[in-house]
Structure formats: C-alpha cells, structure tokens
Amino acid sequence: MSILSKTHLALAMFAVTIFLLAYLSPVSYTSSDPTYTLLTSQALVEYGTIKIDDYKPDLGSVLDSDARLKTVNNHTYYFFPIGTSLFVTPIVWVANWFGLDMRNVEDDAWLQNLISALISVALFFIIYRICIYYLSPENSVLLAAIVVLGTALISTIGTALWNLGSETLFILLGLWLLIRLEHNGANRADPYILGILLFAAFLSRPTAVIFIIMALLFIAFRQRSYFIKTAVTALILLSLFVVFSKGEYGTWLPPYYIPGRLGTGDTPFILTLYGLLFSPSRGIFVFSPMFLVVATLLIILAFKMRFRLPLLLWFGVVWFFCAVLSVSRFGHWWGGHSYGPRLLTDVVPALILITIASWHLMRTKLSERTSHWLTALFLILATVSVAINSFAGLFNSQTIRWNGDMLSPNIDRAPQYLFSWHYPQFLANEELICSRNKDYFKTSLAAQRIVLSPYQLGQPVAPQEAQLAMHLAPGPNWFLPTNWKTQDQNERKHIASGNKIYLPAIFSRWPISTIFVGFAYQKGESIDTLCNPANIIVGPAAFAGKDRDLLLKLTMGTNTPENIYASLNGTPPEALSVDKQSMVAELAISALDLLPDQPNWITLTFSDQEISGQEFNGTILPAIKALSIEDPN
C-alpha cells in the first residue's frame, strides 16, 4: 500500500471516529445558548426573516422570558450571533423538507448534534491541510487527530451548535490561506476568499476580530496588493451587514456585536488569567496539557534562536495572548454552564499554528535526543488530553451536572469552585459532586453568607422554603473554598443565630431555618435525594440542651421499600422504614442532642440502593416532602 493510500485510510478512519464520538455523545448542550440557532434558520426558510415572532403561538410565553432572546422594536430575535443561523439555513431547509421541525426540541437537538459532528470532522481535514505544509503526511494526520480529539474542538464544538463552531471553522480556513501565502502558493482568488472568510468569522462570533486584525496586519506586511483586495472585500461585506442591521434593529450593529455589552467582572486580573490558563475546571493548559510541552519547546527555541523566530510563529504567539487577554476582561470569563475552556475554543487554532511551526523548527534547531524526549512527552500528555476531552467531555454526563443545574452550587453563583483542585470538572462523578455540595453549604455557613434563623419547635419545613437557598447571592470569584474537613465544628460557634440571612431575593418572605444538602432543588411539592448520605441542616434550637424527649418527623416517599438510617449531630444512626409513596417516618430524639447556638445536622443514609443521580423525577429516588421536630405530648 502506498504512502498516499495509507494516509487516506488514516484520514478516513480518524474522520469516522471523530464523527461518531461527537454524534453519539450523551453529553449535550443543545438546550443551552444554541437553542434558537436553528429556529432562526427555519424562520428564514418559512418567512424570509430572522425574527421569530411567528412562532409565538406555538412556543407561547417562553419567548417573552427567555434570556437567549431579545425584543427590539416589539419584535423577538435570537440574541446570539446570526452567522451560524445563516450558514446552516440550507441544511434546515432540507431538514424541513424531510419533515423535521425546529420548534420540536428533539428535532432541534438531533440536527444540532449532526451539524456539530460534521463541523468537527471538517476541522480535522482543514488542520491536516495546514499541517501538511510543515510535517510529513503521516505526522500531519496524527497531529490533526490529536488536536481535535484532545481540545475543545471536540469537547465544546462536538456537543452543540455553538457559534464557536462556525467561527473556528472560518478562522482555520483563513489560517490555511495565510500559510499558503507564506509558502508562495497563493491563488489569484485567495485574497477575495480570505476577505469573505474573515467577515464570515466575525458574523459567526465578533470575538474573531482579534484574528481578523492579526491576519490583515500579516498580509499587509507580506504583500500589499493581497492586503488591499482582502480588506476591500471584507469592508464591502461589513458595510452591507451594517446597512442590514440599521434597517433590522435600528442600530449600526446587532446587540450581541456591540462591545459595550460585555461587562467587566470583579475577579482580579491575575486570577482571571490563571483561571483561563491553569484552573482545574477552565484552564486550557489543564484540559489540553499537551500544549505545555509546546510552550516549553517554544521557550527553548526562542532562547536558542535569540528570539528570531519565523513571522508566522510570532503571529500565533501574539494572537494567542491577545485572545486570552480579551476573554479575561469579560466578567463571565468562565463561560457559564459548559465544559472546560469553552470561551477559548476559537484560540485553539493559534496553538495549532504554534505547535506545527515549533515542531518544524525542532528538527533542525535541537538535538535528536532532545527532540525525542519532547515528542514522547507530548504524546503522553496528548493521551491525557484526549481522555479529558473525548472521553470525559463527551461521555461523562456528570460533567454537565458539575455546573450545578440540580445540585448546588450553581457555578455561576459560586465561581470560586473553578479554582478548587478538590473538585475538578473533568473528574466529575457522583461522589465529587455530592462532596462539593456539602462543602458549599458548610463553607457558606462558616463564612456567614448563610445564617440560619432559629428553628421553632413544631415548625413544619416544606421544600418551597428549602428552594430559597438556591438564591444565595454570588460570592467573590476569588474566594477560594476552605476544606471543611479540617474545621472543627466548635470553631464556628461564633456564627450568629438571629433571623438574619444573606439572600437578597428574600424581602417579605419568612427567614430560612433549614437547608437540604444532597437534594435536588426542583420545583414541586417534594425534593429528590441525589446523594448518599444526604443531610438536612436545621437552625439553632432554643429548646435544645434540656432533658426532654422529642420527635423528628419526616414526610417521605419512595416507590420501593427503603431502609433509611437517621443520625442527629453524630449520634448513632437509627433505622427508619419507608415503603410507600407518602408516609410520615418518626424518630425519637433527645433535646440534649440538639445545639442551641449552632446549626444541627440530620444525616440520612440509604442502605438498600445506591443513589445514582440518573433520575430526577422522584419515581426512584427517595423524596422529602416535609420535616418537623415536635413535642410527642
């Protein structure tokens, strides 16, 4: 078999692998920011407009309250960039012809999944074409596969139709043309094509402006006529977009494209920079550690060559740092509910450029022994990178739950956990998520961000009250969580027990006296157990410390017989039996075991079954409907 045919076979095998991994992945973010991307495309197909007003009769009031939508001049628009919606309109037209409807959640998710998988494959082929200018065909295939499977190019782009997907696609195509120009292989049409690609990247996501500026500066330095043709093409398209925006929105650019919308956060700059580069749940060098070897190689080459590196290599370095600095200014720099360094996905092409250019120099500038050691280390860390992105990022559903949709803390309200090496997202599992949930409430109590009101004897506590804990005000991003295991409970006796609580959402409602730890705070009359053991924290009890018998009552329900062991403040556990949908389980306790000036912990251990965290509808997991401590007399 010839070298060429072996290369083609390897390309085909990796392409199929990448497609299947992305397409079959159970991890999906199709219901997050990309939700209305395809519905906007369908509006173009059916009504010839990007407004989605015509779908209000079908989608109802959700269109009026969804943060992903924006009302402008009494018309409803998808808030996020319209580029992706425009580019996939032909695909949606075909899907509609086959009977799919983007108003249907299942149809929308399926088509998002298909398109995102195809984009991941397209990225693989483009990266291969870029690598071939510097490396052998075999090495080019291998490196292209590694940088797709081991980065956010698969763990972000392969999980939903993010606007980052089309933006990165156009950026890589533009980078390919720049490299072709550098190797004197440019065609006559390339400047015009590059101009179109630069505008398309901006239309997909305005953060592409950094690459656009860098690309224009590069070609201005390299070839003046090329620059003029590219710039004029891009400016003509931009002018048409401005005219369209003025007519459609009444502003020179759509709301999402206006830089002023990006608020600055309160995270110190140096910590944000660390978070984007090295934090355990968003750091790009943590989720793709193979690039640490590339950074090391670049530093070695820079000193060895006295910083006289090729222009394209400097292009990649400056591009990378400018992009990281740009994201660091964004108040929501961690990218919300996502996996890893999502907001740095469009910066991966810069790292790819640095990698291939550095590897090309390594063969002539470094010794064979040093080159072999660096290559071996790169391949080892590449294996780790693939495991983090293609396995954990695509097939570990706990990485979604790590963001805190069902089990506190919500990462947007407690971003300090982005810096905790005790709870890295790529290692998410039930035990880790439940441990973090307990740590969150313990830390909040210790820091007096939650101060429970005294529990009154006989006071019933319903899940509706417990849900108020979800509205805990966000803490400082740089507040690193302490390890509660090293803190003795007696060290926190100073915590006040008055009717005081740091929940700004509560004004006229009752103060909170109880927190449920290890339970899902869903809407409804009950809350489901997600952790084993689970805990109920009850406020200080003024009636504690007296020699009197009391009764702990738990209104619970389960579809299967369940042996539950309850313990109060570390006392020996006693068995409760729950065997029907709704019942009151009673446990005799002593007031001597209650604390008058500290929160009281009731621990529930479930012995008959593991709490899988897979079902949130109360059909399998034990549910709590009410709690009270009463005088048996």
Image (cartoon, rainbow, N blue to C red):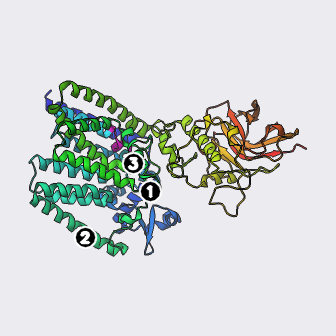
Image spot of residue 324 (x, y percent): 34, 50
Task: Tell me residue 615's x, y (percent).
Answer: 58, 41
Q: Residues within 10 Å of mark 1 (few under 14, many from 20)?
A: some
Q: Identify the residue position indicated by label 3 in the image.
A: 273
Whichever of labels 2 and 1 marks the residue nearer the N terminus, that label is 2
Looking at this view, name the residue that lies furthest to the top: 369
Is 256 one of the magenta-colored residues?
no
Q: Residues within 10 Å of mark 2 (few under 14, many from 20)?
A: few
Residue named by callout 1: 331
- Of the residues shown, which amino acid type is indicated by label 2? Leu
Which is nearer the N-term, disc 2 or disc 3?
2
**Amino acid on which disc 1 is placed:** Gly
Q: Quadrant of residue 192?
A: bottom left
Work out whether 91 lies above or below 141.
below
Cα separation between marks 2 and 1: 31 Å
Q: Name the foreground residue: 209 vs 233.
A: 209
Mark 2, secondary structure of its residue:
helix
Q: SS for tag 1?
A: loop
Q: On the image, numbered disc 2 is attached to which residue?
A: 240
**Extent of the magenta region:** 149-155
| Distance in Å between CA atoms under marks 2 and 3 | 37 Å
